[in-house]
Amino acid sequence: MSQQSLPQYPGPYPNEPYGDPPQPPAHRGTAVAASVLALVGAAVHLLGVLALFSRIDVVARSPFALTSLAANLVVAGLLLPGAILLLQRRVAGQVLVATGAGFAVVYFAFMVLAGFAARLSLNGELDSRSVGYSSARVLVVCLPAIATLVLAVIAPTRRWVRQRRAW
């Protein structure tokens, strides 16, 4: 027996007279929150730069401290203008904030791994208590950067940046 084919119907909404369904209205809440967190993060990293410059004699001799100084400068240099541009509804601000927050998370993870490596090289072993304490501390430090990154890239922030109306 041959199988009869069923009639083929067009897509779910043939001849849709109204176009695409409407998008929810853009609200500034997530963008403003991302900007505020980026400004706070920039201030924290600038304080890190100042603290490292106050000990420039030690920083000049330590590759680890020099890397930390460079990373703090990069993160602050991305977050500060990014926050201002994001409040002005510039896509570049959204990109700078997301990049700066992502770099901060990577930097914090690097600091944890470097701390583990330093402990391992000093005494040849890592105790589970210090690993757990360091991991929890870094997670707490990373949370604002992770929140900034998420708020900068989610859809409501994108819609608000691309919708160029007044507040």
Image (tube, rainbow, N blue to C red):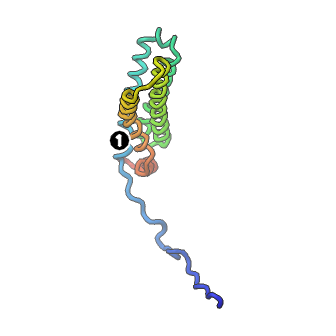
Q: Could you say which quadrant of the image residue 119 lies in?
A: top left
Residue 107 appears in the picture as rendered: yes
Q: Position of residue 76 (x, y in %)?
A: 44, 28
Q: Residue at x 43, y 16 (%)?
A: 52
Screen quadrant of the N terminus: bottom right
Q: Position of residue 102 (x, y in %)?
A: 47, 37
Q: Residue at x 47, y 39 (%)?
A: 98
| Count of labels in the image | 1
**Secondary structure under the numbered disc 1 in the rendered image:** helix
Q: Position of residue 77 (x, y in %)?
A: 47, 28
Q: Residue at x 40, y 44 (%)?
A: 151
Residue position marked by numbered label 1 in the rendering = 33
Categorize mark 1 by other alpha carbons within 10 Å: few (<14), some (14-19), many (20+). Answer: some
For the residue pair 20 and 127, the one nearer the viewer reads as 127
Q: Is residue 4 left or right of residue 26?
A: right
Q: Amino acid at mark 1?
A: Ala
Q: Residue at x 40, y 32 (%)?
A: 135
Residue that lies at the very extreme toward the top in this rendered image: 57
For the residue pair 125 and 27, the one nearer the viewer reads as 125
Q: Position of residue 58 (x, y in %)?
A: 46, 10
The answer to whether residue 46 is above or below residue 31 is above
The answer to whether residue 110 is above or below residue 152 is above
Q: Is residue 141 left or right of residue 57?
A: left
For the residue pair 80 and 151, the one nearer the viewer reads as 151
Residue 77 appears in the picture as rendered: no
Residue that lies at the very extreme toward the right in this rendered image: 2
